[in-house]
Image (tube, rainbow, N blue to C red):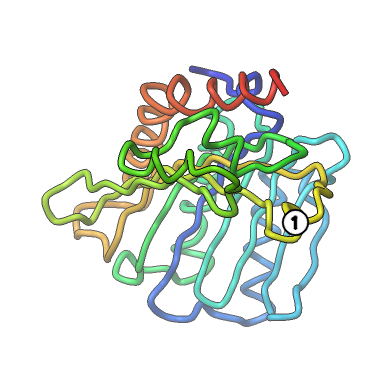
Amino acid sequence: MSSYHALADDYYISMNLTTEMELTGSRETILHYFEQMQKKFPEMRNFYARDKGDFVLEADKEGGSYRWCAIEARRICSGYVNPESFETAIAQHRHVLELAPYNLSLSRLDCEALDLMMGFDFTYRGNQNQLIAEALGVCPAFERLANMPGTSFISNEPALTFALDDECRTQCRVNVETRTNAYQIRTGEFQEEQVSVYVTARQYGSLAQDTTYLEVIERLARVCQEVVDGYVVDGVLHPLARAIALE
């Protein structure tokens, strides 16, 4: 599936590379890295520092589609909200991994985890936990509990993590996140908030001598796309969209 725009109100593809050692924090190194990113993607022109010493470069958000990247103490991040295509977002993450070894002194040994996440947001006003139960059902063992008279769902966030190799170094996680809390259920005052579906493919540990970060991100991209297209679209996204449309 080349485009995911029709599946949710917003979707995004982000990458996080967590390192074992702290990244270099010199002014020259950080600025040079972001200048290289801006050279490739000129629309990323908003640069700022967070309170924790993290640094962010991002494009304007007004249009609803924008790129961003960040450097934290032990993490290199990259994201694209509502990208033109899946490949467009992966190309950005690929460029980050091309720059990082040279600009940030990143070694293949310094990888704690590299993950690629596809996220889908649905705007919904109401008990999102109840919505998930109606759209996706509940575990058969919990069906009788779910049907107890006078009960309300306070938490209902299905999640499944599975390994893709015998050593469990490559894993994939599919999970749903709701934002309804007990106060909202008690008062009946709900705000329009996002129900999120996340598909995350992750590689743990240092890279082998004959493996590059680019090879790993390409493999994780294939895993994410296969899981989303083959399972999550029909099993999660479509039922959720239909349930919201019927409200």
Toward which corner of the image does residue 55 lie, by quadrant? Answer: bottom right
Comparing 227 with 62, the one in front is 227
Q: Residues within 10 Å of mark 1 (few under 14, many from 20)?
A: few
Q: Residue at x 72, y 24 (%)?
A: 247
Residue 97 in the image, given as x and y percentages of width and height: 47, 53
Task: Say left or right for 227 vs 241.
Answer: left
Q: Indicate the quadrant where residue 65 lies.
A: top right
Residue position for label 1 = 186
Q: Amino acid at mark 1?
A: Arg
**Measured along the vertical axis of the image, is residue 222 above or below residue 28?**
above
**Where residue 173 sits in the image (x, y, percent)?**
38, 47
**211 vs 60, nearest the viewer:** 60
Residue at coordinates 54% horizontally, 28% vertically from top-left?
Answer: 135
Image vertical order of residue 138 relative to residue 23, above or below:
above
Which sits in the foreground, 189 or 81? Answer: 189
**Residue, far left:** 166
Residue lying furthest front: 149
In the rendered image, residue 10, in percent from the top left (x then y), is placed at: 69, 33
Check the image and name the residue furthest to the right.
62
Above or below residue 157? Residue 24 is: below
Which percent across, then down, holds residue 112? Answer: 35, 68
SS for tag 1? helix
Q: Residue at x 56, y 77 (%)?
A: 73
